[in-house]
Amino acid sequence: EWRPPLLPAPVALWSLVVAGHLAASHAPLPSRLEEPARAGALAIGGASLLAGSWRERRPGFGRRASIREGLEALTGALAAALAGAALGAEADRAAWPLPVHPRETAIVVEGIVLDTASIDATPPAVLFHARRVRVGETERVVSARLTLRWHDDAVPPRWIVPGLWLRAEGRYRPPEDARNPGQSAPGRWLERLGIAGTVAVDPLSVGAPPDPPERGGSPGAILRDRIARLFASELSPPVGALARGMLLGDRSGISPAIQSAFRDGGTIHILSISGLHVCILAGFLALAGTIARLPLRASAVVELAGLWAYVTLVGAPACAIRSALLWTAVRSGRLLGTVVRPFTAWGLAGLLIHLAEPSTALDPGFQLSFLAVLGLGASGALSRPPGPSRSRAGPLAERVHAACRGTWSLFVQSAGACVGTAGLSSRLFGSIPVVGLLLNLAVIPICTLFMAETALLLAAAAAGLDPVREAAAGAAEASGLLLLAVNAWGARLLDPWITREVAPAWGLAVAALTLLIAWATIESVRGGRVARRTAALWALGALSISAFAPVLPDVASSPSTLPRSAVVVSLDIGQGDATWIGFEDGASLLCDAGPRDERRDMGARVIEPALREEGFAPPAAVLSHAHLDHFGGFEWLARRGWIRDVWENGSDPDGHWREGIAAGLRERGRAFRPVRRDTTALLGRNARMRLLPGPAHGAENDRSLAAHIEIEGRTILLSGDLEAAGEEALLPRLGRCDVLKAPHHGSRTSSAPEWIERIRPSILLVSCGERNRFGHPDAAVMGRYRRVGTEILRTDREGAIRLTITRAGAWISTRAHPAPRWLGWRDDSR
């Protein structure tokens, strides 16, 4: 007889806490209600315990006993939900808005260096404990953790080590909010690490006094510094950065291209400390205990001590703590003769971490780690390979069968982990790496080999065995390069499944719930409550639902059929241009795509997340002219299928920069569309665009392709990098406009008086980088616009700027000032 599966107590409690936390996040409790919610949770939890005690003292049967049991369960569930609500109220305090483009302050800091693992990254950085701070003539004693960061082209002194008292001058920047839609706030990550901001250091100001007022430095930080320096000296830069990421949890030195390949290949967990690394280390320690023939208890003590020492060394990230708690619970249970199921240990680890630090639940690493284990556990009933069982098989057949069984089990585990994280990956990265199902089968063994060789390298260096150290370094170099090559090849083998919309919260909740039920069903097999075949069917169904539920809106809905408001969004991409316009019927237009360099691609970092957040159809695209700060992000967007045909001015037809963009466009039947003369195009039902090329001969800026859009009876002009000559050529074809994207970022070589007098915009959008080296926008030019009554909005101050266009005016909302404000069109701007 089949009975419904039961959740272990820690899993059930954590599920209720998460439910309360989610409810509080969707209907936030003010932070002032945190204490009442916590007090209510304690009071009702006590009432639940009393109800249980009363039921045990006066046992009964029938309806009265059922009422008592129901009361106990109801009060217990309500107490756990209130605890989650209290965590939500606590998190609400930490979610207060951060500044966008905060003002920097010139300061002098003195204090102790805490960690130098990122000193070889780009840009170099160290973790610093400030003890004294001077601003101007005022000096104060403080206690704050800061990140000291050098400029890209600056080299920090190699004598900086943990525990050193340091004095440095620089510009302090507090934690800041996200500058664009679809992005997470970088300041929240700093807050979770307990860091109060960053200081851009003047390299010439760094010094250490001969008699420091204080000495310090934890042994763990000193050990991390020595390990990082050993990797830097013995391994090539990409392999050394890989080793730092996998063994020390510092990914700052890994190039964006490598990180992108691991993300697209579904192997991003390899690059940072995760359960995989902790389990590999624990396996090494257990193997060492076996080789040394230690007694079982002594081996377990050494194993767990080494495991937790490593977790502490790498900074105790949530995913490492989760894996260590799981391993400790299961291992300790075996030693004590008590069976501790992985499902129970998983719930206990999540509950303890969540209650200890509620903000950890908002960390993507925490979420991905626990969902991966959830998917892996839910797939357990499928780990036995299909087919008839063996009987009277010979030794060779047994080996083959064992190899097939191991390969199948590894494939099922990889599939379960990938399915468990599919929804969250689509939400975070905009894609689901399907190739990871197979690529992990090749990458994980190489990862294990690489970690073993780096561990041997560290041991040989510590023991002073130079021949062994050199051999281990060569082996680690070979396996590291092999790991990078195999992963890059696998990531190119099959493109990830691109998700156009953000996975909804209900889809993620449904996926997690089905996986919970499936794992509970598998656990019930051991108690005889559920047959193995039934558990396998539940597992298969749960994995199927989890794979497709998060992306159902992407498959089932058509963005172009949804009612919209016409919007203009000037994205904050630094020194460059990227303007996106969405129309009422779901059509959209992207004009320029920002810059790209070795570390940043604005197409991937800013534009794609913003397009996913908005939920409009993939836009048509306009490239104003062939400068990197305008076309840099187009290659990424073209390869990911985020843009359609690209209208452009046709300059530099043989430029190498075109190759990647053209290849991405060709894959989807798209192409560059040179515009040689004035061209009119329809963008949806109620919008029209005129493309106005600049003069055929002249500077590239003056050849910018301008886009003149008519929407809601109003006009928007996107003018590229036009300067005086280009403006003069376009003036006879233009009239007054309501919204103008400032030519050439508001430089002094553009926006001539005649241009401003003819256009007379109501709103001017200035896209420029914060403290850019060109001095954009020019103060005199901004003054000329102000004299004709123009409202000026700058991305270097406001972040992304959003205009909701109506016939009477525009609602203005920026990242720095998100509350919409109304601006009516001027009568003379029609």
Image (tube, grey):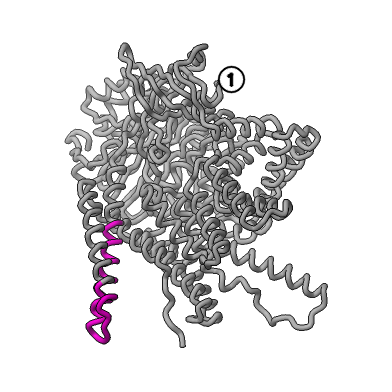
Residue 553 visible (yes or no): no
At 59% from the left and 51% from the top, the residue drawn is 301
Task: Give SS at disc 1.
Answer: loop
Q: Position of residue 117 (x, y in %)?
A: 56, 32
Position above or below: 294 against 508: above
Instruction: Say left or right for 727 vs 435.
Output: left
Residue 543: x percent and y percent? Answer: 51, 69
Residue 784 figure quarter? top left
Nearer to the camera, 184 or 709? 184
Give the quadrant of residue 439. bottom right
In the rendered image, residue 683, in percent from the top left (x then y), is placed at 38, 51
Is residue 350 shown left or right of residue 445? Answer: left
Circle 1 Cα neighbour tier, 10 Å, few/some/many (<14 / 14–19 / ≥20): few
Magenta span: chief secondary structure: helix
Residue type, numbered disc 1: Trp
The magenta region covers 54-83
Q: Is residue 737 left or right of residue 543?
A: left
Depth order, front residue of 618/222: 222
* Residue at 71% in and 32% down: 234
- Residue topped by disc 1: 159
In the image, 299 versus 640, the foreground residue is 299
Q: The C terminus appears in which quarter of the rendering?
A: top left
| Residue at image location 18% in from the left, 35% down from the top | 826
| Residue 481 within the magenta-colored segment of the rendering | no
Indicate whether 104 appears above or below 802.
above
**Point 79% across, 83% down: residue:** 392
Residue 82 included in the magenta stretch of the image = yes
